[in-house]
Amino acid sequence: MDPSSIHNMDSSSPTNTPRLYNKEQLRERITINCTEWRTAGEITKMLGRNLKYIKNFILPKKGDFLEKMYEMPHHPRQKYRAKQSDK
């Protein structure tokens, strides 16, 4: 799959969403779709994976480009977004 085609996917349609991404595709998809604060549930739907997988394996390893709204671990209303570049 051409990585540039990720931009054109309809995230609401599970038939157009691949189940597996390589690291670059995953980073690109999260960065593009998380310019606003998103819950783990919203990210789950966007990536087509289950919530437990996203919370345990994806989000903890993405601190280099993803930031948390609350620093408290396991905050019940935790949200994530792509780190904003300093302007």
Image: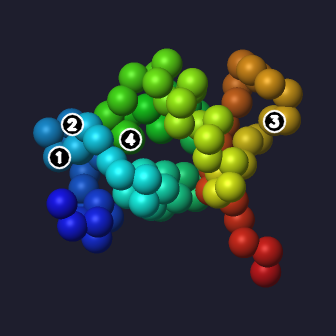
Q: Which residue is mark 2?
A: 14
Question: Callout 2, which amino acid?
Answer: Pro
Q: In the rendered structure, which disc, 1 or 3, sits on the residue that comes first in sequence?
A: 1
N-terminal of the two: label 2 or label 4?
2
SS at badge 4: helix
Query: Which structural element holds mark 3?
Result: loop
Q: Quadrant of residue 82?
A: bottom right
The answer to the question of whether label 2 and label 4 lie on touching residues, with beta carbons closer than 8 A, is no
Q: CA distance from mark 2 to mark 4?
A: 9 Å
State the mark number for residue 16. 1
Q: Residues within 10 Å of mark 4 (few under 14, many from 20)?
A: some
Disc 3/disc 4 C-alpha distance (Å): 21 Å
Assess disc 2: are there few (<14), some (14-19) or many (≥20) residues with their C-alpha within 10 Å of its C-alpha: some
Local crowd size for mark 3, using a 10 Å CA cut-off: few (<14), some (14–19), many (≥20) = few
As measured in the structure, the alpha-carbon distance from the residue carrying label 1 to the one carrying label 3 is: 32 Å
Q: Nearer the viewer, residue 17 or 11?
A: 17
Instruction: Name the residue rendered at 72%, 72% in the picture.
Output: 85
Identify the amino acid type marked 4.
Answer: Met
Which residue does the numbered mark 4 point to in the structure image? 46
| Outermost residue, bottom side | 87
Q: Are marks 2 and 1 in contact (CB under 8 Å)?
A: yes
Give me the disc on residue 70.
Answer: 3
Q: Secondary structure at mark 1?
A: helix
Q: Residue at x 32, y 34 (%)?
A: 48
Give left or right: position of 17 versus 52.
left
Type of amino acid under label 1: Asn
Q: Amino acid at mark 3?
A: Tyr
Q: Earlier in the sequence, mark 4 or mark 1?
A: 1
- What number of labels is visible? 4
Is label 2 in a helix, a strand or a loop?
helix
x, y percentage for residue 62?
61, 46
Toward which corner of the image does residue 84 lie, by quadrant?
bottom right
